[in-house]
Image: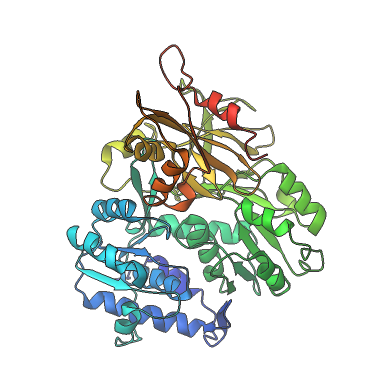
């Protein structure tokens, strides 16, 4: 009887490693070099460590560490061993981590030594049996224990529909939802992008993104690994360093903020990008000014695409001129295998250039929200399309344009910020009667939050003190850049706060 192929994503990535495992796979910004053999052996050792812990099938491994090659190997080891990877933003503070660990109930938590003192009690209270440390200087208990394990490991057998990762994506009602992504979701999307973006032999990727969300962890990392491509690994984005390495690379991926910062550097010239093949932008809208200035300055046209935690990549501007032009202000065409439609509130499919809600289906669309069956059901149509929550249109040539977002999501520097979550924390502060958080344009981050707060009757509030208090509770990217204490909020006849009016009043703050 023929054995079925292993659908473990790691098996596909490992099969794409070059025949010569001694070749360089990763070059870091502090002068270290990792071979493909290093990635193979180190991921095997970590996978064997996890195997020795006696974890149950489908166990979650939650990770909140700084970016490093070892952190990437930890991700590969989790896949390899057949467990579920749960990446957490390094900016998250105790209240947030307590929610994620309590909700996901991971069997293993990996954090930095600096945070271990407060993470361990949270993990222990949630029933987590194993807490390891990992720092970006190649130290920590995870590496110490993995070093004692064998460097030979047989990849765990997985089916396409088995869970590979959970990515928490806050809901507009405040509480985060865990998007469940399968091995099949991740591999199908990676394979489509490999073809669609023309990955080829000899490509070199500058990896300058964080690895706790879709863009850096799945789109960039999977792209390079599935192509057997070397990565120039930058632990933090530094525009001067990126420009210095551009002549050695062919592919760069970034959020719009990174392109703005690169354009501010005089070293960004046509000579610097002479060997580059592709610049990809996503995670937030790319301003047409940035799109045009980049083309004029470098001779390259940025390829803008569209995706989300629940679906990975959905659409992309064309890579090949034969497929069409890359059009600024659009996110291109639905990717092969993705069905995308725009419907109005009555459920009628919109006509050309008519604005409505974007819905999608395809092999890349997630398996649902972790332990939220009702929410999952609510977010899918009767015929199986996922409601993205984005509003957009499709033109006569098939290009998709995102014109807005349902509810009031703020995308700041590529990160999602949900006003309801921030408002919840503000409203709990002493003396606060009510608050509203809105997004306004910002030249660097694209968009930032502004908080408008009302004091309780007879009370007084200090706007700076409110911001300071939030900084002790929330990730920095969520903190409103300005706070105003006002006597009242604008409301409609139904008593609902008119956030559109607040956005209009404050839109010039950072102009």
Spot occupied by residue 456 in the image (x, y as percentages of width and height)? 35, 26
Q: Which one is nearer the viewer's eye here, 432 or 233?
A: 432
How many numbered marks does the figure carry? Answer: 0
Residue 325 makes an appearance in the image: no
The residue that appears at 33% across and 73% down in the rendered structure is 133
Residue 121 image offset from top left, x and y in percent = 22, 63
**Above or below: residue 450 compared with residue 6:** above
The answer to whether any part of residue 440 appears in the image is: yes
Query: Is 40 rendered above or below residue 100?
Result: below
Q: Quadrant of the C terminus?
A: top right
Instruction: Locate residue 182, reporting x and y percent.
Output: 37, 56
Q: Residue at x 47, y 27 (%)?
A: 486
Q: Nearer the viewer, residue 501 or 195?
A: 501
For this view, does 259 lie left or right of residue 468? right
In the rendered view, tell whether residue 130 sits above or below residue 425.
Answer: below
> In the image as oriented, which residue stretches furthest toward the top?
493
Task: Out of 272 and 449, give the one closest to the viewer.
Answer: 449
From the viewer's perspective, is 355 left or right of 156? right
397 lies left or right of 47 = right
């Amino acid at each position: 009887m023929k054995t079925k192929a292993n659908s473990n994503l790691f098996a596909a990535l490992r099969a794409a490693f070059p025949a010569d495992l001694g070749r360089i796979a990763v070059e870091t910004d502090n002068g270290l070099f990792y071979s493909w053999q290093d990635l193979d052996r180190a991921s095997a050792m970590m996978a064997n460590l996890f195997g020795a812990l006696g974890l149950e099938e489908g166990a979650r491994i939650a990770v909140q560490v700084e970016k490093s090659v070892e952190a990437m190997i930890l991700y590969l080891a989790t896949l390899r061993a057949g467990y579920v990877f749960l990446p957490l933003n390094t900016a998250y503070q105790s209240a947030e981590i307590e929610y994620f660990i309590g909700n996901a109930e991971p069997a293993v938590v990996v954090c930095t030594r600096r945070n271990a003192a407060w993470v361990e009690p949270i993990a222990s209270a949630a029933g987590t049996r194993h807490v390891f440390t990992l720092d970006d200087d190649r130290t920590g208990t995870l590496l110490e224990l993995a070093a004692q394990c064998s460097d030979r490991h047989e990849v765990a057998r997985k089916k396409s529909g088995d869970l590979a990762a959970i990515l928490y994506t806050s809901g507009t009602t405040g509480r985060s939802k865990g998007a469940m992504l399968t091995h099949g979701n991740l591999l199908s999307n990676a394979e489509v992008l490999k073809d669609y973006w023309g990955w080829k032999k000899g490509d070199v990727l500058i990896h300058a993104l964080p690895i706790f969300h879709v863009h850096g962890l799945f789109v960039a990392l999977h792209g390079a690994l599935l192509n057997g491509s070397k990565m120039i690994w930058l632990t933090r984005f530094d525009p001067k360093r990126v420009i210095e390495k551009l002549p050695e690379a062919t592919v760069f991926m970034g959020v719009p903020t990174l392109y703005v910062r690169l354009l501010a550097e005089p070293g960004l010239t046509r000579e610097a990008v002479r060997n580059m093949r592709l610049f990809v932008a996503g995670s937030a809208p790319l301003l047409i000014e940035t799109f045009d200035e980049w083309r004029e300055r470098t001779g390259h046209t940025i390829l803008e695409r569209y995706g989300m935690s629940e679906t990975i990549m959905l659409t992309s501007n064309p890579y090949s001129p034969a497929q069409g032009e890359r059009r600024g202000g659009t996110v291109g065409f639905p990717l092969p295998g993705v069905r995308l439609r725009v419907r109005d509130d009555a459920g009628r499919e919109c006509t050309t250039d008519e604005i409505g809600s974007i819905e999608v289906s395809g092999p890349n669309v997630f398996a649902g929200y972790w332990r939220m069956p009702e929410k999952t059901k609510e977010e899918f149509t009767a015929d199986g399309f996922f409601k993205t929550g984005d509003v957009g249109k499709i033109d006569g040539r098939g290009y998709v344009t995102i014109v807005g977002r349902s509810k009031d999501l703020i995308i700041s520097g590529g990160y999602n910020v949900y006003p309801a979550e921030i408002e919840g924390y503000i409203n709990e502060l002493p003396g606060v009667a009510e608050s509203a958080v809105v997004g306004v344009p910002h030249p660097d981050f694209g968009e930032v939050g502004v908080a408008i707060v009302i004091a309780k009757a007879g009370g007084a509030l200090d706007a700076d003190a409110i911001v300071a208090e939030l900084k002790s509770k929330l990730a920095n990217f969520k903190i409103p850049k300005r706070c105003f204490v006002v006597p009242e909020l604008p409301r409609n006849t139904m008593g609902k706060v008119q956030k559109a009016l607040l956005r209009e009043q404050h839109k010039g703050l950072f102009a």
